[in-house]
Image: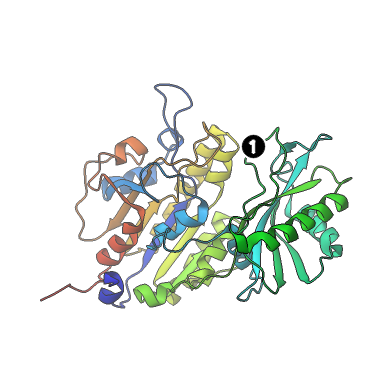
Amino acid sequence: MNIVKELAVKNDKKIVLLVMDGLGGLPMEKGGKTELETAKTPVMDALAMESECGLQTPLGIGITPGSAPGHFSLFGYNPFDYSIGRGVVAAMGINFPMKAGDVAARINFATKDSGGNITDRRAGRIPTEKCAELCDMLKSIDIEGVKVSVQPVKDYRAVVVFKGEGLSDKVADTDPQATGVKPLNPRPTAEDGRRMAEITAEFVLQVNKILKNSKPANTILMRGFAELPHIPSMKDQYKLNPAALAVYPDYKGISRLLGMDIIEGLTTLEDQAEALKINWSRHDFFFVHHKYTDSKGEDGNFNAKVSEIEKVDAFLPELLELKPDVLIITGDHSTPAFLKAHSGHPVPFLIHAEGIRPDDVSHFGERSCAKGLWSNIPGEMLIRLALSYAGKLKKYGA
């Protein structure tokens, strides 16, 4: 029994989920502060004093989340029940049409040396315009019995969609997640993935021939082979009319899979603030996503991640002018600059609404939120709290 679906009711209350991607962090040196603890966040700190605070663990203790599972958790979907590869997320993010049986994979344009070892997994973070040029070069790829479409996503990211008979997503990533080593060979993860692995190997071979003289992107890394899944929409699950305000395509893709309306044409926090005002009367749930806290963490740039957090704090007054009935601020996972990668550390959150029990937290940070009312809860419980505090869950039982 899906108890939340059974109890969900519709009303006019507005919920905003503000996600700073990769929000959680670590000190760069012993005894230091995290990025969030270092940032000057007067608005978040003031909200924390009037909110219920805590930590949330997106996937379970010690498990490092990918972006899609981390967000699925925030939207109340058990990530282990709805496993999805980044390929479909990327394809849906650019609204590329997929049908049952198609297989998509995320592509990183990357740099390799003369020995074939990866020197940069992101090819210097090439701009989207360069990515589009490279994708155009790959239109000549020809694999018997398979239609191949390579499309730019954003920056160094692209997506490939394979269409044909008897395809499978049972193929392991070719991205070794490290530099100084060769890309991994496409490998089937099940017997029915053997043909798909062979198709992928041929695809990579042709890509490398085409890009051999290209700089800085002269190869690709592939991740998240996936077929199109069926996922119940947030409208069906929660009786919500949700909208997504995201800059990066992948997060539009996740939102589109869950039936959210996608607000297009956004590139900055200022755009997102204006879009909130324009669309405020049309929806009752708003997902607002800020990517750059994560990318600066992956770059190992502690100060730049601090700056991104401070930019979001400066954006908050415009959001608060709209007087959302429930506001949640959190992240989908931790990306400490110290590690230059996602990590399994729990993520701080605050939930601000009428009829709550503010705790003693006076600063929005990892260690202060750990002392908050909610301590450490599963990430997928946040949507339940939001619905409850918005009066969108009726009483259970007599």
Q: Residue furthest front?
A: 191
Whether residue 266 appears in this view of the structure is: no
Task: Specify the quadrant that holds the N terminus.
Answer: bottom left
Q: Is residue 29 above or below residue 138?
A: above
Residue at left 47%, top 56%? 69
Q: In the rendered view, does 340 fall on the left or right side of 204?
A: left
* Residue 240, percent from left and from top: 38, 74
* Residue 162, percent from left and from top: 71, 67
Residue 236, located in which quarter of the rendered image? bottom left
Q: Which residue lies furthest to the top in this view?
A: 30
Q: In the rendered view, does 129 fall on the left or right side of 314?
A: right
Residue at left 55%, top 51%? 291
Q: Element under label 1?
A: loop
Residue 280, located in which quarter of the rendered image? bottom left
Front residue of 329/385: it is 385
Tell me the crowding category of disc 1: few under 14, some 14 to 19, or many 20 or more residues within 10 angstroms, Cα based.
few
Which residue is labeled 1 in the image? 178
Q: Is residue 143 above or below residue 97?
A: above
Residue at left 25%, top 71%? 393
Front residue of 170/110: it is 170
Task: Specify the quadrant that holds the C terminus.
Answer: bottom left
Whether residue 360 appears in this view of the structure is: yes
Front residue of 158/359: it is 158
* Residue 140, percent from left and from top: 87, 63
Residue 111, located in which quarter of the rendered image? top right
Q: Residue furthest right?
A: 213
* Residue 380, percent from left and from top: 35, 58
Q: In the rendered view, does 213 fall on the left or right side of 73?
A: right
Front residue of 63/109: it is 63
Q: Which amino acid does label 1 sit on?
A: Ala
